[in-house]
Image (cartoon, grey):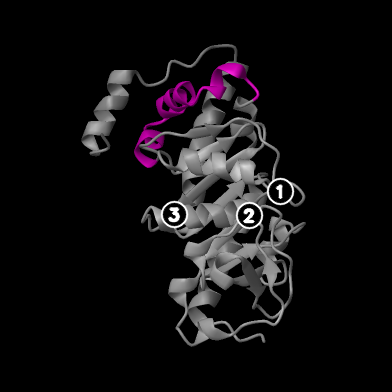
Amino acid sequence: MNFSLPASVDNELGRIAEIAGYLWMRNWAEANGGNISVNLTHLMSEVSRNYLSEVIQEIREPVPLLDGNVFYVTGTGKRMRDVARSPLEHGAVIQILNQGTGYSVISPKIVKPTSELVSHLLIHNHLKATGLHKSVVLHTHPTELIALTHCRPFVDPEFLTRMLWSMIPETRVLVPKGIGLVPYILTGTSALAKATIKQLEKHRVLLWEKHGAIAVGEDIAECFDIIDTLTKSAQIYLNARMAGYEPEGLSDEQSDELAKAFNLL
């Protein structure tokens, strides 16, 4: 049984569409690259969460803490430029059922969720388990950040973090916990999800080596801003290198001064 989505959900879908458009315009979403999931449960009344479709799909990795929760997820094989135009034509609202072992599509059009659905749901389950009030998981393909993961020194997350922090002050302020990194693992697998969760114990944004970036946050614009700022730092570094010199960057003392000024330590 399908139902009309509450106005609060329609508003959130508009925000998702806006960010999907930015991902496409930034060239971070080639073809069907990237995916988004947003927990909508808090935007829905108890009554509106009780509409169930007859079709239930199995979740191969149970997510018991999400039982009854409602999510928007982009569709498998769907393009961000199309999500920006019509999020419900190219994504789905799903409800997690049966103690987290299955889900039902409850939006008007039946769209199969992203192939990264298991990763997204396991991450959301982890966020619930740790009491973090983060409702958004954003995965996208920022060119310059991916390029850095093809360079062996930058596969060291501490080295990568220090370099990105040093390019512009905003990076240290917006990404105070630094950036995590998951060595290359086949996309769409539980192994990738579990390695990501391990990194989320310390970070709110990380890179999948040779693949892309993933950020979690309370708001989809927050996730975009974090990745956007990191990408600006990577662009500054790579532009300097293309000009033939190693950028000086902020010193450790200058970076630590920022951290103290903004209470980031």
Which type of secondary structure does the marked residue at label 2 adopt?
Answer: helix
Residue range (magenta): 150-174
Q: Quadrant of residue 5?
A: bottom right
Which type of secondary structure does the marked residue at label 1 adopt?
Answer: loop
CA gap between label 2 and label 3 equals 14 Å
Residue beneath disc 2: 118
Q: Is residue 27 above or below residue 132?
A: above
**Of residues 224 and 239, the one drawn nearer to the viewer in this rendering:** 224
Residue beneath disc 3: 127
Residue 37: x %, y % from top left: 57, 60
Residue 30: x %, y % from top left: 74, 46
**Of residues 52 and 149, the one drawn nearer to the viewer in this rendering:** 52
Magenta-drawn stretch, dominant element (helix, strand or loop): helix
Residue 65 is left or right of residue 265, and the answer is: right
Q: Earlier in the sequence, mark 2 or mark 3?
A: 2
Residue beneath disc 1: 33
Q: Is residue 172 magenta?
A: yes
The three-letter amino acid code for the residue at tag 3 is Leu
